[in-house]
């Protein structure tokens, strides 16, 4: 069940990133972020009602801190995308995002997965970079640096979500989305004339992205509560860039490079090793 939930997390993030990659070329990144988190608030309100629990003050605080991390990470990543560095930004952010929880597990949590699981984790990190990297002569080095920063923040987000108590239900996730939305609105209002995209189609698309992104957070928390280790679930969940590449090949006629194929095969093998281990 843990692996299935982690794979669903991957699919949900991948679909959202595929949609966001095109939208950030048309609308301001800050406005997209505000809209997607607004949609997330609505969805997590339903989740909180349907998934009651007994959250402690610590759980709600972790949810709030996770909201700050999520809002900051998305803003940074979408800025990186808007600068024309999607092809290098996506793999850089994904690799860093998966590496931070691994470092936490080793240095702080003292988790000791089996040797087979560790092989799968390392292979999975390599597969993330291979499956999502694309040649692009117009890469923006500044955008790449921003994407790496986003990856660090996302890694912190995963650690914070992992620390939420199993009996807390959906309330911390609702708090997380509310805080992220408030942060996004504040930044958007300070940097532009609008909070949401002016075009209705762009607003709708950003809302759809927000639903997929929120579903990914819920699925990630459920995967951890089903007994998965932070390192393993983070690596599986970070394969989202490969999903976005596959969608681009199938729906946009994008070319798949040989190393991307190798990376996707490696990702499948990594998931199998983590499952067996």
Image (cartoon, helix red, strand yellow):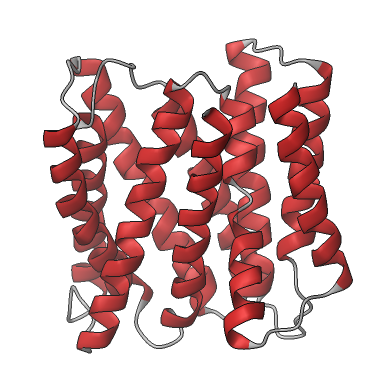
Looking at the image, which residue is at 67% across and 57% down? 92
Q: Is residue 188 left or right of residue 100?
A: left
Vertical comparison of 235 with 168: above or below: below
Q: Let me know if residue 142 appears in the view.
A: no
Residue 5 percent location from the top left of the image: 49, 37
Q: Where, by quadrant of the figure, is residue 147 drawn?
A: bottom right
Vertical comparison of 69 with 20: above or below: above
Residue 82 percent location from the top left of the image: 49, 78
Q: Is residue 115 left or right of residue 223?
A: right
Residue 108 percent location from the top left of the image: 59, 14
- Count the marks: how many? 0
Looking at the image, which residue is at 31% across and 27% down? 62
Q: Is residue 13 left or right of residue 97?
A: left
Q: Let me know if residue 251 appears in the view.
A: yes
Looking at the image, which residue is at 75% across and 48% down? 267
Looking at the image, which residue is at 41% across and 47% down? 216
Q: Which residue is more in the foreground, 132 or 68?
A: 132
Residue 199 percent location from the top left of the image: 22, 89
Q: Which residue is more in the foreground, 123 or 227?
A: 227
Vertical comparison of 69 with 191: above or below: above
Vertical comparison of 193 with 211: above or below: below
> Where's the C terminus, which quadrant?
top right
């Amino acid at each position: 069940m843990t692996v299935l939930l982690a794979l669903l997390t991957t699919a949900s993030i991948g679909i959202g990133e595929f949609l966001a990659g095109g939208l950030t070329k048309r609308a301001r990144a800050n406005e997209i972020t505000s809209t997607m988190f607004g949609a997330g608030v609505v969805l997590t309100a339903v989740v909180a009602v349907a998934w009651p629990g007994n959250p402690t003050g610590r759980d709600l605080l972790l949810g709030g801190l996770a909201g700050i991390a999520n809002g900051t990470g998305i803003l940074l990543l979408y800025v990186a995308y808007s600068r024309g560095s999607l092809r290098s930004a996506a793999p850089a952010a994904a690799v860093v995002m998966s590496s931070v929880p691994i470092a936490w597990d080793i240095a702080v949590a003292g988790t000791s997965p089996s040797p087979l699981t560790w092989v799968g984790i390392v292979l999975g990190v390599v597969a993330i970079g291979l499956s999502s990297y694309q040649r692009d002569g117009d890469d923006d080095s500044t955008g790449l640096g921003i994407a790496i920063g986003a990856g660090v923040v996302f890694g912190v987000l995963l650690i914070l979500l992992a620390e939420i108590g199993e009996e807390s239900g959906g309330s911390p996730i609702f708090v997380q989305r509310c805080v992220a939305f408030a942060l996004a609105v504040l930044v958007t209002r300070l940097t532009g004339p609008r909070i949401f995209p002016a075009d209705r189609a762009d607003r709708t698309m950003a809302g759809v992205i927000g639903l997929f992104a929120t579903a990914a957070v819920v699925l990630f928390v459920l995967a951890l509560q089903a007994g998965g280790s932070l390192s393993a679930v983070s690596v599986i969940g970070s394969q989202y860039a490969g999903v976005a590449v596959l969608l681009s090949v199938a729906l946009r006629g994008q070319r798949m490079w040989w190393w991307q194929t190798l990376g996707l095969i490696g990702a499948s093998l990594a998931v199998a090793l983590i499952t067996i281990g």
